């Protein structure tokens, strides 16, 4: 009952949110929503202890797949978005063959290399990928009406509602996976890989499974992005974007489900809203870099550790009266 | 407030408000200016990151331009004079950020016109342009398509102007018979490869090799130059290479002993190139972007007021930064100012109509025609004469103004052939 | 044709020289610190800007400016070690993020101090050794080749023949065992960071007059360096040098005989094949994997 109440409040806040923002902040909100899915899916992979530098390129695979399918065969856009996820997952499955022969930093750099190869293929083959200019004129999400609300997907508010629903569903699935026996095995693969192996767990299969699922959701995020902006090119998915995803996850902290999301929200608002409002166009990267360093030095466990401190104190306080009984 | 929202009252009002936004949001905010109110112009280009060299110097030029216009009273509309000011948004050359920036400039800052570099960022902005009807400009006509009627390419008709240099070269140095070319493999490089190929074929100059494409991240150009020189060409063509490529390529050409003709679209900071090679080596280098202290720019037909003074001021404030984009955005503003004053308002539709009245426009290098139907699907590129610039005795000098439309009337089919080959026709751009 | 091959060979030797300086520094830092230094390309850039500031703007003799570049960037490395990597010693991912933050700061400082435009650096010398009309080696490129050979030999001697080098190798192999042997982990970390960063600075300073110096020039070199250290094996210095040579020759010859974009694809394919056949790289050892 209490949970239902909390979720209703959150839904109401999310519903009201865009109306409290300026137009450009609404645009940032859409991209933020999509990035939340990127960083949350990234966390699923990190559960197994592997850090990839190819996640954003995989997201791009979803974007390209959905854009090309809807464009060439007139596939209905929401189906295209799902297909984007499927193609991204399958690509990850193919990549897992060479990549999961490696672990740790080898995997980190290997995934970077695999991503660069994919990007180079997009650049090199103007047919069908559009070369360095990429694909433009991607079909937008078709407008529709649900009676009391007209979705007009040019408007950031409408697209925010749509993407928020999609992202919420995906987050729910990711959450369920994490709490399922499979998810617990992922963590075992990370922390106790020798032990897990001894108890008959096929490590590589589980790593591959986490990689494929994470990539599938990244692909959905990429497709959401593509159908909103209407254009994608190889540079939209380069290593600099990946660096942002990585920093969101690490600054937020990856030991909880909400940590990376928190990092993404806080850093995006800082970079795109606060620093721009302050008129610091030229020094923005400098300040962002400083924030990264300071937060990693003084909050090694991420933003989530602050939240945890706060909630634990509260729990303790609420527990005390019971203890007294 | 949240409790209220839960009871429904608040959220229903939010419903109403949001659907009202949906219905009206597409329209521009009220565009009429109060008397004497400052006119705002959006500057939506990369100001940080690797592409910022194509944005920042242009904004600097615009600042000087605005000061000069404001000193003379500003823009004269029907209801009197208005000062002018630029609002910049750094799009980092990213389509998503460009979209956000366009929304901010149009819906929050209330700008009357948005100037962009274009390229990768334009497709992200296109839906905003279509829905708001805002007038946009780009430096790259390859962004034009019949889908968007409010985008113009009024200054740099890249890459079509480069035919003038080749034509002039063929007329004045007929002994040069063979050429090779290199280009970076990107949105700027490929259309100009196609254009140079057409121009060389039209001029009867034989290509000795396919154009050599290199990755934009290349830093060591020795292998590229070795390849170019392996066929002993008379002419080496540097396409639309950025100055980051032109300088090291020329240095390598010098060190590897090339003694022939060089032709390039740009030669920003050519004085540094001369210092890195030699005066003799750079003598006769042909390109397309004049210094604005050139006496030829004082001619009657030039539509850039006091070009020489602008150049002096720019160099005083930003020493050693003068380049091709320094004047281009300011020159677009000059065109826009003429049109706004003719229309008597800053309403985008009225300004565009005034700008294109009679199919002619006042391009920086003289009166020009709105053109482009065959190449871009829409007559929104302003094309007329373009200067051919040559380095003589260590200084860039305009040798001639050559008509682009005259060339196209004779050789248009060649250009279409090569543009098609490199997938650069508007109908081929996916 | 033979002339073309010879000239291309000379081009490749030069490319191998500066790539190996950068890659060896990156490997050294990874080996001793256990951190992938994302800011390595920006250290290269910083070395180039030292030459801009001293040689181009203040007319300090070139080789003094280059030496200053090595020392200055080496000190930047020490700064990174003290301020970033030492507090984050038990947190390799933290070190990665910190180096990303450092990269952004260095880029922004270069933009603020020098502008986004390419910098002008007057030529050091225009002398050319002409083996024939079409086979020429500019002296300025010869400097880079000589510097790389000398510095890499010195490094090799230092690592294999001195006590410091022995300590460095020991703590790269097993930091805990090394500490038990009385080797100061902090000292070896300092040495590794100074040399690793200094080599990147040296490469940047030496090649500054030959490339376009701008605040974002570090990006392309770090991508190349990553490819090289994967091919060579992430922890191996010998592997990094050998892989630099292989990569430089493959890339240069493919650029000359096909084109630059195909050369990039070939380089990446080379890396992919190595990864599939021997995931730890040509010289990598399995225990770090």
Image (cartoon, coloured by chain):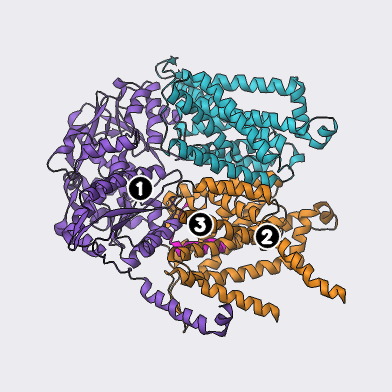
Chain colours: A orange, B purple, C cyan
Q: Are the two marked residues, 2 and 3, in contact with CB atoms closer than 8 angstroms?
A: no
How would you classify the magenta stretch by its main secondary structure? helix
Question: Mark 2 Cα within 10 Å, few/some/many (few <14, many 20+)?
Answer: many
| Residue B124 x %, y % | 41, 59
| Whether residue C27 is visible | yes
Question: Do the dots labelled 3 and 1 sit on one chain?
Answer: no
Front of the two marks 3 and 1: 3
Magenta stretch bounds? A218-233
Q: Is residue B156 left or right of residue B45?
A: left
Question: Do the dots labelled 1 and 2 sit on one chain?
Answer: no
Residue carrying label 3: A274
From the viewer's side, name the closer residue of B138 and A103.
B138
Q: Chain of mark 3?
A: A
Residue carrying label 1: B422
| Residue B391 x %, y % | 26, 28
Element under disc 2: helix
Image vertical order of residue B38 relative to residue C8, above or below: below
């Amino acid at each position: 009952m209490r949970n239902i109440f909390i979720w209703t409040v959150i839904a109401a806040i999310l519903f009201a949110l865009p109306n409290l923002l300026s137009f450009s902040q609404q645009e940032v909100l859409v991209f933020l929503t999509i990035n939340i899915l990127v960083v949350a899916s990234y966390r699923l992979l990190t559960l197994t202890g592997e850090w990839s530098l190819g996640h954003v390129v995989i997201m791009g695979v979803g974007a390209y797949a959905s854009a090309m399918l809807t464009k060439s065969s007139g596939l209905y856009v929401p189906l295209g978005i799902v297909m984007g996820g499927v193609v991204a997952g399958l690509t990850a499955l193919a990549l897992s063959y060479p990549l999961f022969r490696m672990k740790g930093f080898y995997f980190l750099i290997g995934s970077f290399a695999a991503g660069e190869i994919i990007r180079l293929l997009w650049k090199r083959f103007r047919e069908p990928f559009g070369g360095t200019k990429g694909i433009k004129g991607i079909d937008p999400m078709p407008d529709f009406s649900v009676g009391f609300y007209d979705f007009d997907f040019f408007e950031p508010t409408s697209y925010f509602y749509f993407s928020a629903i999609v992202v919420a569903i995906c987050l729910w699935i990711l959450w369920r996976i994490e709490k399922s026996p499979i998810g617990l095995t992922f963590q075992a693969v990370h922390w106790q890989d020798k032990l897990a192996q001894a108890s008959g767990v096929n490590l590589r299969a589980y790593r591959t499974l986490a990689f494929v699922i994470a990539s599938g959701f990244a692909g959905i995020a990429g497709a959401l992005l593509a159908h909103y902006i209407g254009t994608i090119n190889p540079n939209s998915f380069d290593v600099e974007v990946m660096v942002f995803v990585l920093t969101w996850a690490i600054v937020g902290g990856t030991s909880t489900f909400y940590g990376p999301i928190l990092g993404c929200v806080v850093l995006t608002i800082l970079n795109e809203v606060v620093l721009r409002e302050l008129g610091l166009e030229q020094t923005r990267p400098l300040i962002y870099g400083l924030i990264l360093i300071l937060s990693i030095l003084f909050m090694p466990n991420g933003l989530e550790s602050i939240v945890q401190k706060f909630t634990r104190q509260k729990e303790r306080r609420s527990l005390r009266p019971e203890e007294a009984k | 407030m949240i409790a209220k929202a839960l009871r429904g009252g608040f959220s229903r009002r939010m419903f109403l408000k949001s659907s009202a936004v949906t219905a009206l949001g597409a329209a521009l905010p009220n565009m009429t200016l109060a008397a004497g109110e400052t006119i705002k112009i959006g500057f939506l280009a990369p100001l940080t990151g690797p592409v910022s060299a194509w944005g920042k110097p242009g904004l600097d030029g615009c600042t000087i331009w605005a000061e000069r216009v404001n000193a003379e009273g500003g823009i004269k509309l029907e209801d009197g004079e208005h000062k002018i000011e630029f609002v910049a948004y750094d799009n980092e050359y990213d389509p998503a950020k460009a979209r956000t920036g366009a929304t901010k400039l149009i819906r929050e800052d209330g700008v009357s016109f948005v100037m962009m570099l274009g390229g990768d960022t334009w497709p992200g902005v296109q839906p905003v342009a279509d829905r708001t009807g805002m007038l946009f400009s780009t430096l790259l006509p390859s962004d034009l398509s019949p889908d968007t009627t409010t985008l113009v390419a009024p200054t740099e008709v890249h890459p079509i102007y480069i035919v003038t240099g080749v034509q002039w070269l063929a007329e004045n140095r007929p002994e040069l018979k063979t050429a090779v070319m290199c280009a970076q493999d990107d949105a700027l490089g490929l259309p100009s490869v196609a254009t140079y190929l057409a121009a060389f074929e039209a001029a009867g100059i034989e290509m000795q090799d396919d154009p050599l494409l290199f990755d934009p991240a290349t830093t060591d150009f020795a292998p590229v130059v070795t390849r170019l020189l392996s066929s002993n060409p008379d002419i080496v063509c540097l396409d639309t290479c950025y100055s980051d490529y032109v300088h090291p390529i020329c240095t390598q050409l010098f060190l590897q002993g090339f003694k022939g003709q060089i032709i390039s679209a740009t030669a920003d900071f050519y004085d540094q190139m001369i210092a890195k090679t030699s005066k003799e080596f750079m003598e006769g280098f042909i390109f397309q972007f004049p210094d604005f202290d050139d006496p030829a720019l004082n001619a009657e037909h030039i539509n850039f007021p006091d070009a020489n003074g602008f150049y002096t001021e720019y160099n005083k404030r930003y020493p050693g930064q003068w380049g091709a984009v320094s004047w281009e955005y300011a020159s677009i503003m000059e065109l826009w100012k003429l049109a706004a004053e003719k229309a008597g308002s800053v309403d985008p539709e009225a300004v565009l109509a005034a700008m294109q009245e009679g199919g002619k426009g006042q391009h920086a290098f003289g009166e020009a025609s709105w053109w482009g139907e065959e190449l871009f699907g829409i007559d929104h590129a302003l094309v007329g004469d373009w200067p051919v610039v040559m380095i003589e005795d260590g200084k860039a000098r305009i040798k001639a103004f050559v008509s682009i439309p005259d060339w196209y009337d004779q050789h248009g089919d060649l250009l279409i052939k090569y543009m098609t080959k490199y997938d650069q026709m508007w109908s081929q751009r996916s | 044709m033979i002339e073309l091959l010879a000239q291309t060979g000379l081009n490749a030797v030069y490319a191998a020289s500066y790539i190996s300086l950068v890659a060896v520094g990156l490997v050294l830092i990874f080996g001793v610190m256990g951190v992938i230094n994302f800011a390595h390309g920006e250290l290269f850039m910083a070395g180039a800007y030292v030459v801009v500031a001293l040689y181009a703007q203040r007319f300090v003799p070139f080789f003094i400016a280059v030496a200053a570049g090595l020392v200055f960037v080496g000190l930047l490395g020490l700064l990174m070690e003290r301020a970033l990597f030492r507090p984050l010693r038990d947190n390799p991912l933290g070190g990665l993020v910190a180096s990303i933050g450092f990269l952004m700061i260095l880029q922004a400082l270069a933009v603020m101090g020098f502008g986004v435009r390419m910098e002008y650096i007057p030529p050091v010398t225009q002398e050319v050794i002409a083996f024939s009309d079409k086979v020429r080696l500019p002296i300025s490129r010869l400097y880079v080749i000589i510097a790389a050979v000398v510095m890499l030999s010195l490094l090799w001697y230092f690592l294999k023949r001195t006590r410091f080098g022995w300590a460095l190798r020991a703590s790269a192999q097993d930091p805990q065992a090394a500490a038990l042997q009385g080797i100061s982990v902090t000292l070896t970390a300092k040495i590794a960071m100074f040399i690793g960063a200094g080599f990147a600075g040296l490469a940047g300073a030496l090649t500054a007059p030959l490339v376009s110096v701008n605040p974002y020039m570090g990006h392309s070199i770090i991508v190349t360096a990553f490819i090289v250290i994967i091919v060579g094996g992430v922890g191996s210095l010998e592997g990094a040098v050998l892989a630099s040579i292989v990569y430089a020759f493959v890339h240069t010859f493919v650029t000359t005989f096909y084109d630059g974009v195909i050369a990039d694809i070939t380089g990446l394919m080379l890396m992919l094949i190595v990864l599939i056949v021997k995931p730890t790289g040509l010289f990598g050892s399995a225990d770090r994997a």
